[in-house]
Amino acid sequence: MKKQILPCSITLCTLLLSPTVMALNCGEDPAQNRVQANNYIFQILDFIDLPVQGIKHEVRTSTTIINNRNESTAKHILNYDENGLITQSQYILYSDDNKRVYSENLQKTAVGWENFIEDLEYKTSSIIQFKTDEQGKIVESQQAKKALDFIFTETDSYQYDSNNCLISKQVKWKVKGIDDKGKFTGVDQNGASAYTFNYQQQQLAKVLYQFSNNTQNESNFLYQYDNNYRLTAIQSAYLSASKDVVNYTTQFLTFDDKNDWLTATKIRQDQKNKQTNIVREITYY
């Protein structure tokens, strides 16, 4: 889930989001495809996902540097089951003066998962509930967000192919304005969007976005490997109908003896003065 700002002009703010860098696979194993699709749907802020092999617990510390100055630090704690499925996640973002400004807490429930989100900077709180089918695939998520002057709701439904590969997402959202006493003002907005996921060589290659205002955007992904078949970089490009192409690069710099990455960097090509460095600590089963 990307951090969202929801002012009155919400139409595109909640939808035109830069791509989360995810190495989503669509292979021959339906069970593993389901795991990866679920992890992808969670879309936890700043999360870089790779197929998890035997990882039980990990801690990621991300530091964003602008003009050689620390602007923010994020601590992300993740727990997985033996199949690599996220069972619990805690993400906390701190400002440069070490104040908590944003947090997400994802946990498993009897019927799926719940994610509690608190944005102290924009004074919003949210809960997202994820529902699963009999196979354990996430088929629907419902979000409710409350701010000082609006209530935002969103329902997402997910579709898969016969091999449990995520192929599309349908989104419906609504915003209802409220006054300082919590009463509805009658100022409502609503909209919808559709996402289509395309794969090449069993990896996510393109995401197409179709919005209810007839805007069409897309994200494209390219993957680089070294001679040991380790993923070393993900190139992503976000094409917006109304803006220039935005390019992102995530590089995996160091690896342990199991070929899992330990350090990485993330940059946006047109913001050379800004870089996020990630350090990963892993505990195995």
Image (spheres, helix red, strand yellow):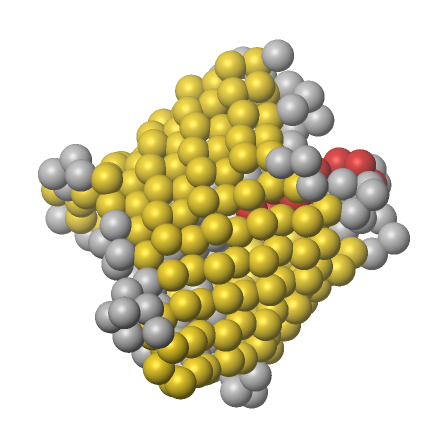
Image vertical order of residue 219 relative to residue 203, above or below: below
Q: How many marks?
A: 0
Q: Left or right of 178: which side holds 107?
A: right
In depth, the one of 45 and 134 nearer the eye is: 134
In depth, the one of 21 and 73 nearer the eye is: 73
Image vertical order of residue 229 relative to residue 236, above or below: above
Q: Residue at x 65, y 32 (%)?
A: 85
- Residue lying furthest right: 162
Q: In the picture, residue 210 is in which quadrant?
A: bottom right
Q: Residue at x 73, y 46 (%)?
A: 132
Q: Position of residue 98 (x, y in %)?
A: 16, 35
Q: In the picture, residue 108 is in which quadrant?
A: top right
Q: Left or right of 209: which side holds 19?
A: left
Q: Is residue 158 visible?
A: yes
Q: Left or right of 145: which side holds 28?
A: right
Image vertical order of residue 198 relative to residue 193, above or below: above
Quarter that holds the C terminus: top right
In depth, the one of 269 and 157 nearer the eye is: 157
Q: Position of residue 70 (x, y in %)?
A: 16, 40
Q: Residue at x 24, y 70 (%)?
A: 180
Q: Position of residue 201 (x, y in %)?
A: 73, 50
Q: Position of residue 111 (x, y in %)?
A: 69, 41
Q: Residue at x 45, y 38 (%)?
A: 105
In depth, the one of 259 and 125 nearer the eye is: 125
Q: Is residue 245 visible?
A: no
